[in-house]
Image: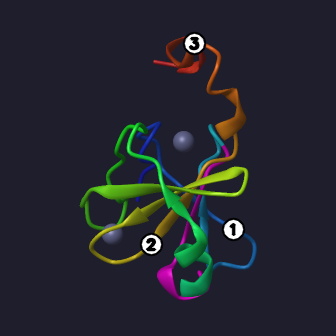
Amino acid sequence: MTCPRCNIELTTSDSGDSLRCPQCSGWLVPAADIQAEALDLATESPEQEQLRCPADGDLMKTVQLGDAALDVCNQCGSVWLDAGESVDDTDRSSSLSR
Ligand SMILES: [Zn+2]
Ligand SMILES: [Zn+2]
């Protein structure tokens, strides 16, 4: 599977139950590892760009949970966690490698 932001291959974490992007340090977490209660507390962030799920290509819904922005797949419930979500004020295009 590939990173929804970088389009490069994700690597498996040491524990083997999540996937990590070596470029942006984002994480893909299986739906079973995310507590539904946590998602209930999250607020939707409609201004965020929509990502596509690495697992099935469906659109993901961006939600804000505390300081973290999560992208939740509408289809399979997998969650994408961004590592560098705090850099929103900078020009995002300049940080992309391609
Ligand atoms: Zn990435
Ligand atoms: Zn999915």
Which mark lies nearer to you, 3 or 1? 3
Q: Image check: 71 left or right of 20?
A: left
Confirm if mark 2 falls within 8 A of ligand 2: yes
Q: Does residue 14 show up?
A: yes
The foreground one among 38 and 84 is 38
Q: Residues within 10 Å of mark 2 (few under 14, many from 20)?
A: many
Residue depicted at 73% across the width and 50% down the height: 67
Q: Name the N-terminal-most of marks 3 and 1.
A: 1
> Which quadrant would the N terminus be assigned to in this image?
bottom left
Assess whether residue 26 is covered by the magenta stretch.
yes
Amino acid at dot 1: Ser
Q: CA distance from mark 3 to mark 1?
A: 29 Å
Q: Residues within 10 Å of mark 3 (few under 14, many from 20)?
A: few
Q: Name the N-terminal-most of marks 1 and 2.
A: 1
Amino acid at dot 2: Ser
Q: Which residue is mark 2?
A: 78
Q: Residue 16, image x and y in percent?
A: 65, 78
Kindly state the secondary structure of the residue where label 1 is placed: loop
The foreground one among 83 and 23 is 83
Which mark lies nearer to you, 1 or 2? 2
Amino acid at dot 3: Asp
Res. 50 image quadrant? top left
Q: Which residue is mark 3?
A: 91
Using the image, tell me which numbered label, if any, was put on residue 13: 1
Q: Name the N-terminal-most of marks 2 and 3.
A: 2
